[in-house]
Amino acid sequence: MSCIFCKIAAGEIPADIVFKNERVTAFTDLNPMAPTHILIIPNQHIDSVDAIVNDETARAAAECLRAAREIAQARALTGGYRLVTNTGPDAGQSVPHLHFHLLAGRLMTWPPG
Ligand code: DGP
């Protein structure tokens, strides 16, 4: 297993874990781009949105969204938050394990750069 996010989900390398259940792990991003910057990943390895191809992978992705809502609620992110998932090189995906960036704590511009 060479995937760094698989290793974080398995507890093999350290991360600041903020949420964990059977299907999902969430941890603080190494290079935060907002006061709150959390990565939400399925514990199962899925390369990206492009690999959500069946009920199992769709459920894993949906569980990440449910975790996002639970994290936002637990942290009282009442001002709102942004969820981003980069897919492929043009979008800047650097880790090939599906992940959702949960960003909050500052005003976000739209459209993004
Ligand atoms: P993306 O560019 O969308 O693939 O985002 C990958 C993010 O993952 C990036 O913001 C930095 C973060 N990251 C990469 N390696 C690690 C790591 O080992 N630990 C943590 N906490 N974050 C990482």
Image: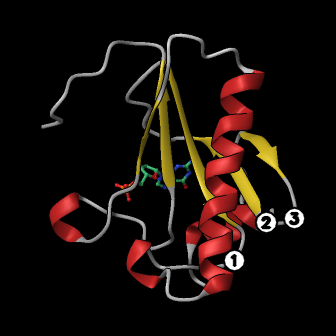
Residue 20, percent from left and from top: 82, 51
Residue 6, percent from left and from top: 66, 72
Q: Quadrant of the C terminus?
A: top left
Q: Earlier in the sequence, mark 3 or mark 1?
A: 3
Judging depth in this view, the residue of 106 and 32 nearest the camera is 106
Local secondary structure at mark 2: loop
How many marks can you see?
Answer: 3
- Mark 2–mark 3 CB contact (< 8 Å): yes
> Which residue corresponds to the image point at 61% horizontal and 16% vertical from the top-left?
77
> Which residue corresponds to the image point at 47% horizontal and 79% vertical from the top-left?
47
The quadrant in which residue 69 appears is: top right
Q: Residues within 10 Å of mark 3 (few under 14, many from 20)?
A: few
Residue 106, percent from left and from top: 39, 12
Q: Earlier in the sequence, mark 1 or mark 2?
A: 2
Q: Quadrant of the N terminus?
A: bottom right
Q: Amino acid at mark 2?
A: Arg
Q: Residues within 10 Å of mark 1 (few under 14, many from 20)?
A: many
Residue 22 got which mark?
Answer: 3
Q: Amino acid at mark 1?
A: Gln
Q: Amino acid at mark 3?
A: Glu
Q: Residue furthest front?
A: 55
> Which residue corresponds to the image point at 57% horizontal and 69% vertical from the top-left?
4
- Mark 3–mark 1 CB contact (< 8 Å): no
Q: Residues within 10 Å of mark 2 (few under 14, many from 20)?
A: some
**Left or right of residue 91: residue 39:** right
Residue 42, percent from left and from top: 66, 66
| Residue indicated by mark 2 | 23
Judging depth in this view, the residue of 12 and 28 nearest the camera is 28
Residue 44 got which mark?
Answer: 1
Q: Is mark 1 within 8 Å of ligand 1?
A: no
Colouring style:
secondary structure
Local secondary structure at mark 1: loop
